[in-house]
């Protein structure tokens, strides 16, 4: 088998929810993924298709994806942050089920403030 990164469209595709840019209507990966959705995805193979222990051992990390069909330089950073940071925290720490996005909120608020102070126009946290 091959080593792989997790990138589930159900939680980590940051361009979802903007509508279908070809034929109108909703996109194939709707709805929009909030930072809470991104953070709440558990990096456990059990959250997707069943894997054997040998297949699980091949998972080396994950990525949040932001495809370019509906994003350009004018909105890229706002669309990516703080949602990509929420995914990054999940990937680095992968906390157990007792930790919630509410626990992550103070850390992400501090990180968003740091991004804004550096000129990165990160979206506000609700």
Image (spheres, grey):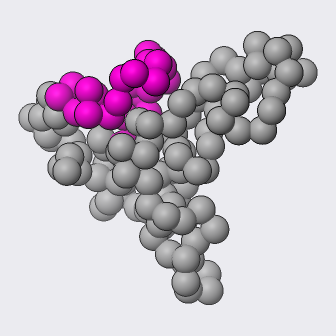
Task: Judge left or right: residue 42 versus residue 121.
Answer: right
Task: Judge left or right: residue 67 versus residue 72.
Answer: right
Q: Which residue lies at the image location 20% right of the left edge and 46% below the top edge? A: 125
Vertical side of 76 occupied by 105: above or below: above
Across and down, in percent, residue 101 comes to 32, 34
Which of the 4 quarters of the picture holds residue 111? top left
Q: Nearer the viewer, residue 97 or 108?
A: 97
Q: Main secondary structure of the magenta part?
A: helix
Across and down, in percent, residue 50 comes to 80, 32
Across and down, in percent, residue 77 comes to 31, 48
**Residue 121 visible in rendering:** no
In the image, residue 118 lies in the stretch drawn in magenta: no
In the image, residue 91 lies in the stretch drawn in magenta: yes
Q: Which residue lies at the image location 47% right of the left edge and 18% below the top edge? A: 96
Task: Judge left or right: residue 63 versus residue 45.
Answer: left
Q: Nearer the viewer, residue 106 or 69?
A: 106
Q: Which residue lies at the image location 17% right of the left edge and 28% below the top edge? A: 106
Vertical side of 102 occupied by 72: above or below: below
**Residue 43 visible in rendering:** yes
Say which quadrant the N terminus sits in: top right
Q: Which residues are magenta?
A: 83-107
Q: Residue furthest right?
A: 1
């Amino acid at each position: 088998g091959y080593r792989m990164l997790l990138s589930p469209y159900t939680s980590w595709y940051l361009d979802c929810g903007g509508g279908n840019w070809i034929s109108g209507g909703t996109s194939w990966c709707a709805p929009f993924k909030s930072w809470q959705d991104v953070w709440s995805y558990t990096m456990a193979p059990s959250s997707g298709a069943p894997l054997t222990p040998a297949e699980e051992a091949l998972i080396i990390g994950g990525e949040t994806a932001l495809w370019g069909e509906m994003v350009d330089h004018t909105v890229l950073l706002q669309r990516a942050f703080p949602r990509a940071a929420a995914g990054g925290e999940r990937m680095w720490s992968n906390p157990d089920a007792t930790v919630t996005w509410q626990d992550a909120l103070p850390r992400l608020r501090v990180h968003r403030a740091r991004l804004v102070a550096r000129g990165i126009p990160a979206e506000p946290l609700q």
